[in-house]
Amino acid sequence: MGSTAVKVRNPRTGDSDYEIAPREEADIIALARRLRDEQAGWSATGIDERSEALLRWSKAIAANSAAIAKALSIDTGRQKISQIEVDGAVRLIERWARSAGDIIAAAKVENRPTSIPGISTSTRLVPYPLVGAISPWNFPLTLALIDAIPALMAGCAVIVKPSEVTPRFIKPLMATLDHTPGIPLSVIEGDGVTGAALVRHVDYVAFTGSVATGRKVGAAAADAFIPASLELGGKDPMIILASTDPVQAAEIALRASVVNSGQACQSIERVYVAREIANPFLAALGEKAKAVRLNYPDIHSGDIGPFIFERQAVIVQAQIDDAVSKGAMLLAGGQVEALGGGLYLRPTVLANVTSDMTVMSEETFGPVIPVTIFDEPGEAIARANDGIYGLSASVLAGTAEEAEAVAAQLKAGAVSINDGSLTSMVWEAEKSSFGLSGLGPGRMGDSGLLRFFRKQALIRQSGTPLPLVAYSEGEGR
């Protein structure tokens, strides 16, 4: 059964002014067959040729930057970050083109002796023929390509199914491939039904999104007996120790919490501050939060944009209301505003929060900063580790050494030291997701590329093969 047409909402106007036609499963089967055929030649070209092809594509993306950025800005309600996404896509390709050859060479094994005399081994890296990537709506282009590019560099063919919430960039992006034929990549329009069908017809799936959907993708991958990389949600904590400058800490916490209106998996969503500096920290944070401007009515002005996904505004407002009803104090923001058809929330600072409030346990995905005061670092560590997620975290202190001592006790895949949300900026740092924040190989560091290979061992006998008699039961034979 095919999916019906899906209307796409403009987050600034509230109008459904765009429409996509999700691919039917028969189309995906045909596309998968074609890309598998193309993959054999793509893989055989070698890493240098693949790098050159992708670098040509990066130039086509740069040349068509304005069209792609415009499509992104309409779907997300933000302009500067949309352009940053396009520029980042070019750098992403350049980065993997520069580094992939060395990573692959280092992972290969040639003629390694074994514990058995005369027998040595070599390792071949065999790419999965077809990778499927399913990406979310908060950074539509970045998260569509973050798995696709290393998979292509590995020699795989790739199908990407971006979120139906933000699909307008697909057509201008695919148009750039017309200038660089031969790259076995297709970015397709589709909804959840499309994504489910995609998992059934690929050899590896990379998914970025919510825990709820990630569970479904993981189950479908297990049913299809294919590996999966799942990058899921987070509830990232920040611990601010007493030795920290409270004003600087407020600036870091604000940026790490509200960039992109908090619609990022690595956003700081819980803040634990030492009692000794709590008052000046909260005063500075509230003041700075109130100074943040919405990019309404002019998309080219202001600091943060609207909620991209209408339903997210409802979730965030419910968390704020729950906290206030249970005794939390609002120091800034607190109410979703309907402006020109869009839904906006000014940075919201909540003090006196407690662990029974949903804003402290459930993913928020909005510009909300709940703050709890602690007396001893051990108390903050215990609270930061109390939850189902473990994507990333942050520790601020007077010295890096003091911060790292606390960071080592946190159950999180990456910890930013004396800053926040560095995970999104540093690709070289290989990490794992803890808890329900993910499963399978990570996308950062060398594993971001090597996960798309299977290893084949070539076991070489250079001595005399054993005869059957070596295993016979009789003595003296």
Image (cartoon, rainbow, N blue to C red):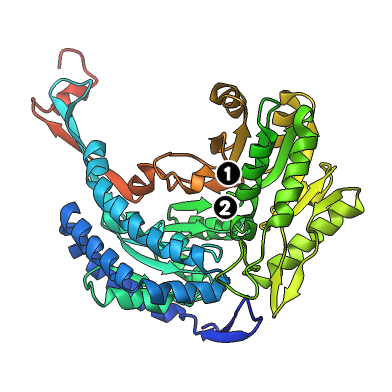
Whether pointer 2 and pointer 1 mark residues with C-beta atoms closer than 8 Å, the reply is: yes
- Residue found at x 56% / y 68%: 78
N-terminal-most mark, 2 or 1: 2
Q: Is residue 162 left or right of residue 380?
A: left
Figure check: 395 above or below 302:
above
Toward the top, the furthest residue is: 476
Q: Residue 419: where, in percent of width, then height?
A: 56, 38
Corner quadrant of residue 300: bottom right
Instruction: Please report the residue visible at 23 percent of the width from the left and 72 percent of the height from the top.
Output: 180
Q: Residues within 10 Å of mark 1 (few under 14, many from 20)?
A: many
Which residue is pictured at 66% across the width and 81% down the height?
Answer: 14
Front one among 468 and 329: 329
**Which residue is disc 1 drawn over?**
391
Q: Which mark is residue 232?
A: 2
Residue 187 in the image: above or below residue 348:
below
Q: How many marks?
A: 2
Q: Amino acid at mark 1?
A: Leu
Work out how far the residue at label 2 is from the one at label 1, CA to CA, in angstroms. Answer: 8 Å
Residue 263's spot in the image, x, y percent? Answer: 61, 59
Q: Quadrant of the C terminus?
A: top left
Q: Residue at x 71, y 44 (%)?
A: 270
Vertical relation: 75 (above or below) 21: above
As shown in the figure, which amino acid type bears the numbered disc 2?
Answer: Leu
Q: Position of residue 444 (x, y in %)?
A: 42, 45
Q: Locate residue 202: give its quadrant.
A: bottom left
Closest to the observer, 137 or 22 = 137
Q: Is residue 291 visible?
A: yes
Give the left or right position of residue 289, taking residue 414 as reference.
Answer: right
